Amino acid sequence: MPMLSRPFALTPGEPAGIGPDLCLLQARQAQPHALVAIASRSLLAERAKQLGLRIELLAAGPNHWPTEPAPAGALYVWDTALATPAVAGQLDARNGRYVLETLTRAGQGCLDGVFAGMITAPVHKGVINEAGIPFSGHTEFLAELTHTEQVVMMLATRGLRVALVTTHLPLKDVAAAITAERLERVARILHADLVDKFGITQPRILVCGLNPHAGEGGHLGREELEIIEPTLQRLRAEGMNLVGPLPADTLFTPKNLEHCDAVLAMYHDQGLPVLKYKGFGAAVNVTLGLPIVRTSVDHGTALDLAGSGNIDTGSLQVALETAFQMARS
């Protein structure tokens, strides 16, 4: 893979969690592209000592961005000050603004063309809110930063991509949220980003029904007949390859997925349990619809494992690979 001239931004997320550990463990091996961790240098140095790692922390920042990857055992760092020293496993609301500063530097750097994309380690939403900063997640924060009206959550692992029409909603509110307008917006974003950011010329997308057996002809719910199928028909008329609505209990079978580029699920726990069963620990969260490339690990801060070295970097590896692929496409 030819090397990109611009570096990628890596944000370690919650400083008391495993994000800093992930960055340091990943730095043990050389990357195909330059990678800049936007983090407290002192935090990374202290955590490396705790983990028994010898990682050289190389300075990066405005006017001295790397164009070549760091060698194995080294990591470029754009030093970003903590409000107070971070202790592995111990949340401190005083560092909430530090987390958002790292995300702002990464996102704005992508918008300004400094970075080719950004990869995020997990944040702790609760402690940021405890700091008095309303925060509902990376996705919403980056949508606001980039002035993006509609974004789409997609998780991917090797051999399967699942995008969601609705995300973090109580199940009782899902049916009302499945409108023709929302379904059309999400399908258009998914299709466009599969073309533009994944290089798939004519994506084939399988679409789940909302109800058991995809409504069974209206006997188990009418959303498929009145909303989903008419919307898919309109988009098919424009040339999109959309298959469905299909019963979700049989859609996720090898025969159906063999020639599929993505699955569009109606709600969070319809599609993501299958994906996480297939690839937990080696999956990536991708935010579609943004004017920038952003991928993330598929797990949380794991405060109990921070500083232990007993963690799996598989999800970060997939997040990096996916960001590199998207930036090239």
Image (tube, rainbow, N blue to C red):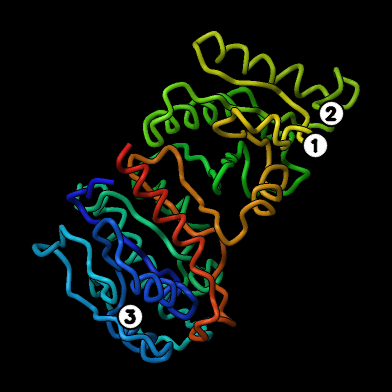
The residue lying toward the viewer, choosing from 181 and 290, is 290
Q: Residue at x 66, y 14 (%)?
A: 230
- Looking at the image, is 255 positioned above or below residue 156? above
In the structure shown, which secondary structural element does the residue marked by tag 1 occupy?
A: helix
Where residue 153 appears, as percent x and y from the top left, is 53, 44
Where residue 98 appears, as percent x and y from the top left, is 35, 73
Left or right side of 205 for 6: left
Q: Give the label, 2 or 1, closer to the camera.
A: 1
Left or right side of 86 for 178: right
Disc on the earlier residue, 2 or 1: 2
Left or right side of 63 for 154: right
In the structure shown, which secondary structural element does the residue marked by tag 3 occupy?
A: loop
Q: Residues within 10 Å of mark 3 (few under 14, many from 20)?
A: many
- Looking at the image, is 183 positioned above or below residue 121? above
Whether label 3 touches label 2, CB < 8 Å: no
Whether label 3 touches label 1, CB < 8 Å: no
Left or right side of 299 for 196: left
Number of callouts in the render?
A: 3
Q: Which amino acid type is shown beneath numbered disc 2?
A: His
Disc on the earlier residue, 3 or 2: 3
The residue where tag 1 is placed is: 249
Residue 213's tag is 2
Whether label 2 touches label 1, CB < 8 Å: yes
In the structure shown, which secondary structural element does the residue marked by tag 2 occupy?
A: helix
Q: Give the label, 3 or 1, closer to the camera.
A: 1
Name the outermost residue toward the right. 219
Residue 82's tag is 3
Where residue 7 appears, as percent x and y from the top left, is 23, 56
Q: Residues within 10 Å of mark 1 (few under 14, many from 20)?
A: few
The residue lying toward the viewer, choosing from 71 and 87, is 71
The answer for how far apart the CA atoms under marks 3 and 2 are is 52 Å
Q: Give the label, 3 or 2, closer to the camera.
A: 2
